[in-house]
Image: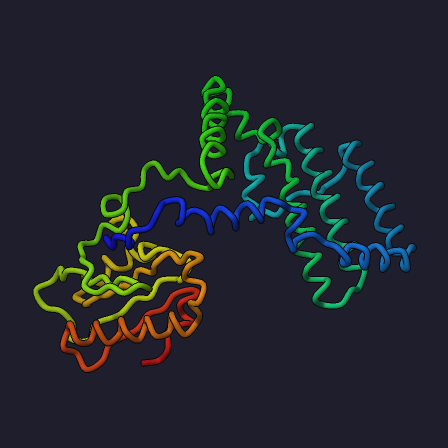
């Protein structure tokens, strides 16, 4: 485990809190369609026959859905609607078909507008996200799987969900959590591969993992995790850890653990991280007396990891 350099908890939380809060204020984000929405409406207004044809077809499809003659169905690979309740229940089947027909028509209208490539991609992403967000599978009162769980647990799942929501909004950054963090403990349930910090700078700590074989390879490997992530993204639970696998195969492994930058580190730039990788690379070679070392950069760090 690589302990972070001492910093106030509030100091660490402010950057992420500000980021998530700004994302939550939709009116200030770049996801708003803005002029692209007007471009879409203007383009469709210039193609009234095309837009009208789409809407007529949608109306005809609605009529078929209500009559029970529509064959609209989700993709077999769409796991959101894998529960047989979506097709066996007449009401849910009609709700699903209306959703699919409407979402498909909206996306087709975006394509029909024949906007420039950048505007089209931006609107496609926005509209696609909105269509996905409005999926009936996200509605606890419509989703048959959620209904079954509610019945089986006598509503206990709804109580747990409400408690989780209250817990999430009671602490910063006050947004719903995507994971349950209560079961994670660094050094026990995650980042459990034995190692020690052997070098430290204001930018990073360097972890050297203990050998788990009688003999090790001469050339060590330096692992550089994403600059926006923790080192243990490469050292998850036992049995699911890249680091664990490598040391069990006789590989000498070093890992950078990036410091969480705050406002006082505003002068850091790409050069800062590149020099950090080079410095860690040299430390690893010296520690193992190896003339060279292998380098593995992941995600954003693959662009900051130079060829030694």
Identify the residue at horizontal 40%, vertical 70% (top origin).
302
Is 272 rendered above or below residue 2? below
For the residue pair 262 and 291, the one nearer the viewer reads as: 262
Image quadrant in which you'd find residue 243: bottom left
Residue in the picture at 37% in, 77% down: 306
Could you say where residue 186 lies in the image, as x and y percent from the top left? Answer: 27, 46
Residue drawn 74% across the image and 44% down it: 101
Looking at the image, which is closer to me, 287 or 4? 4
Residue 123, given in percent of the width and then of the height, sits at 71, 57
Image coordinates for residue 249, horizontal then vertical, percent? 19, 64
Q: For this view, does 197 lie left or right of residue 112?
A: left
Image height of 163 relative to 120, above or below: above
Q: Is residue 157 above or below residue 84?
A: above
Residue appearing at x 26%, y 51% in the figure: 191
Whether residue 67 sits left or right of residue 9 in the image: it is right
**Position of the C terminus by quadrant:** bottom left
Residue 170 locus on image (x, y percent)? 47, 32
For the residue pair 207 and 118, the one nearer the viewer reads as 207
Nearest to the observer: residue 119 or residue 21: 21
Q: Give left or right: position of 144 versus 6.
A: right
């Amino acid at each position: 485990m690589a302990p972070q350099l001492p910093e106030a908890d509030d100091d660490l939380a402010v950057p992420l809190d500000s980021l998530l809060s700004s994302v939550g204020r939709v009116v200030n984000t770049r996801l708003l369609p803005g002029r692209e929405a007007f471009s879409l409406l203007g383009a469709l207004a210039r193609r009234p026959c095309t837009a009208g044809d789409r809407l007529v077809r949608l109306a005809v499809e609605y009529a078929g859905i209500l009559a029970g003659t529509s064959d609209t169905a989700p993709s077999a690979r769409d796991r959101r609607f894998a529960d047989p309740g979506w097709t066996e229940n007449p009401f849910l089947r009609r709700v699903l078909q209306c959703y699919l027909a409407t979402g498909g028509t909206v996306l087709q209208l975006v394509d029909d507008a024949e906007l420039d490539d950048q505007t089209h991609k931006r609107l496609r992403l926005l509209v696609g996200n909105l269509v996905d967000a409005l999926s009936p599978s996200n509605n606890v009162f419509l989703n048959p799987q959620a209904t079954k769980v509610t019945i089986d647990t006598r509503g206990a799942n709804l109580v747990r969900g409400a408690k989780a929501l209250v817990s999430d909004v009671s602490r910063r950054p006050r947004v719903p959590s995507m994971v349950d963090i209560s079961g994670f403990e660094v050094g026990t349930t995650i980042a459990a591969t034995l190692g020690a910090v052997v070098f430290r700078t204001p930018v990073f700590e360097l972890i050297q993992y203990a050998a788990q074989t009688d003999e090790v390879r001469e050339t060590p490997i330096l692992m550089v995790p994403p600059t926006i992530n923790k080192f243990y993204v490469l050292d998850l639970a036992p049995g699911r850890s890249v680091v664990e696998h490598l040391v069990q195969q006789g590989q000498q492994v070093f890992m950078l653990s990036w410091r969480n930058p705050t406002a006082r580190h505003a002068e850091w730039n790409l050069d800062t991280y590149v020099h950090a990788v080079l410095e860690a690379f040299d430390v690893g070679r010296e520690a193992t007396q190896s003339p060279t070392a292998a380098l593995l950069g992941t995600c954003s760090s693959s662009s900051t990891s130079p060829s030694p």
